[in-house]
């Protein structure tokens, strides 16, 4: 989920950016609407003064990032790319950058052009003369109080800045170019790409004690795949249950392991052998740290790199073996998978 925040001067075109992004499938969450709802709950008149007063008051009570927190909670429920409009406090930016994949847009234009736009917009908070408009902007532009609006400081933190002195087509062209950059930036790496395929392969697994998958790749081409399951023609755990064998670790702890199935890595290597596919110099992608037996097979077939989605709690021996054999071992995250003893 990508979260785009929008900041900028009054009447610069934040709403226009929102409209274009909504056309691209983004879901819109508005700080303005968030505050108006609170103003009405307090039975206050809806205008810019009350918006500023309520925003500052709430920031002092519950934190300068309270609007960002509320809107991000709403956005996460949608789990889609979204827009948070009208970022006005640096703490909001800091919170969003620390809690989601956040990109800040800033839009600006000549002040007279902006005033003409808000006159045409004629919203309940914009019914002011030019002098008042300028005073409102100046009041919100700078502040040494961390709980108050500081549009200038927010604009300085923007990842992308849009000049909206032209027409909507000009703004659209600028936005399209930026979205292309963002989408390219957010392309998965090759390791992420192949691990996503591992997750799909693992859905074919037939042992519910550990549905793991494996993909073996060379020169960015998939050679073979494998998933945990019984040997061809034999009953699966999902059909007849597990076949447990007691084992004891180096600390004397006894646990039961299912021995009915062939591990995903073993199945993939067997597939390569059946088809006469050489695995020398290949990369193996898997769900978790390979077991000792899988590790020995990986070493002997010439695989030089292993990428695991997670660590397995008993994988220390494998890590040592790979280090001795000169095989690069990569963990995409440090979460340790553990299965309950049965």
Image (tube, rainbow, N blue to C red):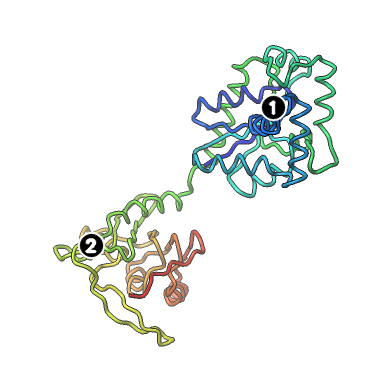
The residue shown at (61%, 25%) is 17
Neighbor class of circle 2 (other Cα within 10 Å; few <14, some 14-19, many 20+) is some
The residue shown at (55%, 40%) is 75
Residue 296 found in image quarter: bottom left
* In front of the other: 216 or 147: 147
> Mark 2 = which residue?
238
> Mark 1 = which residue?
107
**Front disc: 2 or 1:** 2
Query: Can you name the residue that lies furthest to the left here?
Result: 233
Q: Quadrant of the C terminus?
A: bottom left
Q: Image check: 125 left or right of 313?
A: right
| Depicted 202 relative to depicted 74: above or below | below
- Residues under numbered marks 2 and 1 in contact, where contact means CB atoms less than 8 Å apart: no
The residue shown at (64%, 30%) is 33
Residue 46 found in image quarter: top right
Tell me residue 334's x, y (percent).
Answer: 51, 64
| Depicted 325 relative to depicted 98: above or below | below
Q: In terms of sequence position, does the residue under pointer 2 or pointer 1 come before the other? A: 1
Residue 166 found in image quarter: top right
Query: Can you name the residue that lies furthest to the front here?
Result: 43
**Label 2 – label 1 distance at C-alpha:** 57 Å
The residue shown at (44%, 72%) is 313
Circle 2 SS class: helix
């Amino acid at each position: 989920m990508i979260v785009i925040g929008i900041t900028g001067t009054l009447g610069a075109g934040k709403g226009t950016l929102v409209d274009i992004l909504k056309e691209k499938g983004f879901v819109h969450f508005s700080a303005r609407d968030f505050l108006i709802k609170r103003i009405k709950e307090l039975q206050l008149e809806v205008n810019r003064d009350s918006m500023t007063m309520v925003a500052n008051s709430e920031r002092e009570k519950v934190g300068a990032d309270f609007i960002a927190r509320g809107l991000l909670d709403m956005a996460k429920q949608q789990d889609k790319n979204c827009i948070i409009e009208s970022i006005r406090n640096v703490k909001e930016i800091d919170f969003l950058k620390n809690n989601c994949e956040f990109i800040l847009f800033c839009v600006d234009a000549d002040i007279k052009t902006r005033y003409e736009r808000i006159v045409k917009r004629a919203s309940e908070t914009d019914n002011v003369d030019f002098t008042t408009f300028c005073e409102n902007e100046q009041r919100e532009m700078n502040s040494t109080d961390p709980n108050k609006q500081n549009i200038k400081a927010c604009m300085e933190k923007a990842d992308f800045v849009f000049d909206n002195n032209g027409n909507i087509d000009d703004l659209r062209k600028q936005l399209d170019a930026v979205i292309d950059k963002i989408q390219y930036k957010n392309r998965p790496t090759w390791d992420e790409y192949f691990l996503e395929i591992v997750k799909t392969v693992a859905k074919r697994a037939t042992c519910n004690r550990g549905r793991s998958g494996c993909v073996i790749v060379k020169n960015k081409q998939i050679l073979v795949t494998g998933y945990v399951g019984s040997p061809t023609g034999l009953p699966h755990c999902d059909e007849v249950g597990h076949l447990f064998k007691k084992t004891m670790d180096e600390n004397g702890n006894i646990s039961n392991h299912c021995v009915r199935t062939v591990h995903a890595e073993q199945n993939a290597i067997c597939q390569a052998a059946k088809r006469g596919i050489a695995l020398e110099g290949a990369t193996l992608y898997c769900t978790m740290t390979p077991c000792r037996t899988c590790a020995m097979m990986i070493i002997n077939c010439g695989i030089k790199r292993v990428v695991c989605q997670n660590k397995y709690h008993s994988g220390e021996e494998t890590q040592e073996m790979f280090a001795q054999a000169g095989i690069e071992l990569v963990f995409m995250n440090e979460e340790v998978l553990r299965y309950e003893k049965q």
